[in-house]
Image (tube, helix red, strand yellow):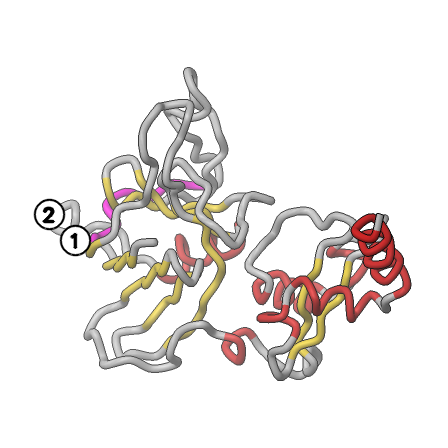
């Protein structure tokens, strides 16, 4: 009887707690970080309704590492200086590295992010990623994105689609695909980027990040060696 009353008391406490306190109890690592405030999504709210400004919306989505649809009860974090900050202010990578003497894309599957570095070592853009998951039941094997150093060897357009997934006929959209290891590619994914690794091995990106990489950063394969495209370094999960 005493246990039952304790359960009821906790339930009542959760109902009367302010939503921001409820959010902090669920995501202390996010909501206790200096410079951010957490918000618990209410029914009917969307990225567009909460953040009508496209620049601010894109920044908040990247800070939360997802372009998936919001749902009631979801907790998101918002930069306190949203109006004045830019993307690089929230980068999960160093702003400068030892000059690699060529462009390089760093993909970190633990940070769930990519970083695009110029030859002089300056980070010029970053964005969220979702890599391959540990096990794919539809093909009965691991789908992890392979870690290592690669070069992009094939580039696609907004019409790029998978030749294999979904099983058996393929056809899944892969806009702005950039293949770097067999069938594994960087590509855009509308609504499919989350803070986790859930793909069949490809690296999912926000569509506008994929388009920017494809047309404004990545160099196409050149010379007699078709694999001499832009370098990509993948750190595994």
Q: Which disc number belongs to residue 110? A: none
Neighbours of disc 2 within 10 Å: few (<14), some (14-19), many (20+) = few
Q: Which residue is mark 1?
A: 228
Q: Residue at x 35, y 59 (%)?
A: 107
Q: Position of residue 234 (x, y in %)?
A: 28, 56
Name the element at disc 2: loop
Horizontally, residue 225 falls left or right of residue 9, namely left
Q: Residue at x 53, y 76 (%)?
A: 90
Do tag 2 and tag 1 residues touch (Cβ < 8 Å)?
yes
Q: Position of residue 161 (x, y in %)?
A: 44, 31
**Compared with residue 126, is residue 210 higher up or lower down, i.e. above or below?**
above
Name the element at disc 1: loop
Instruction: Specify start and end residues of the magenta stretch as a single range.
Output: 150-157
In the image, residue 151 lies in the stretch drawn in magenta? yes
**Compared with residue 171, is residue 201 higher up or lower down, i.e. above or below?**
below
Q: Position of residue 47 (x, y in %)?
A: 73, 56
Q: Which residue is mark 2?
A: 225
Residue furthest to the front in view is 1
CA gap between label 2 and label 1 equals 6 Å
């Amino acid at each position: 009887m005493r246990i039952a009353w304790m359960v009821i008391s906790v339930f009542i406490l959760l109902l009367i707690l302010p939503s921001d306190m409820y959010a902090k109890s669920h995501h202390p690592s996010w909501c206790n970080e200096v410079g951010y405030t957490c918000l618990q999504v209410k029914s009917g709210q969307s990225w567009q309704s909460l953040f009508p400004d496209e620049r601010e919306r894109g920044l908040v989505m990247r800070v939360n590492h997802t372009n998936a649809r919001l749902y009631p009860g979801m907790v998101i974090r918002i930069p306190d200086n949203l109006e004045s900050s830019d993307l690089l202010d929230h980068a999960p990578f160093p702003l400068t590295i030892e000059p690699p003497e060529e462009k390089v894309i760093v993909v970190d599957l633990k940070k769930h992010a990519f970083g695009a570095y110029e030859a002089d070592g300056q980070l010029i853009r970053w964005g969220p990623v979702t890599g391959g998951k540990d096990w794919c039941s539809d093909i009965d094997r691991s789908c992890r994105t392979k870690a290592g150093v690669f070069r992009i060897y094939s580039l696609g357009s907004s019409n790029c689609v998978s030749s294999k997934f979904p099983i058996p006929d393929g056809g899944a959209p892969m806009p702005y695909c950039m293949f770097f290891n067999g069938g594994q590619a960087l590509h855009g994914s509308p609504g499919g980027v989350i803070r986790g690794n859930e793909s069949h091995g490809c690296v999912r990106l926000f569509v506008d990040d994929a388009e920017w990489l494809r047309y404004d950063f990545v160099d196409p394969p050149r010379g007699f060696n078709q694999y001499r495209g832009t370098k990509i370094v993948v750190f595994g999960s």
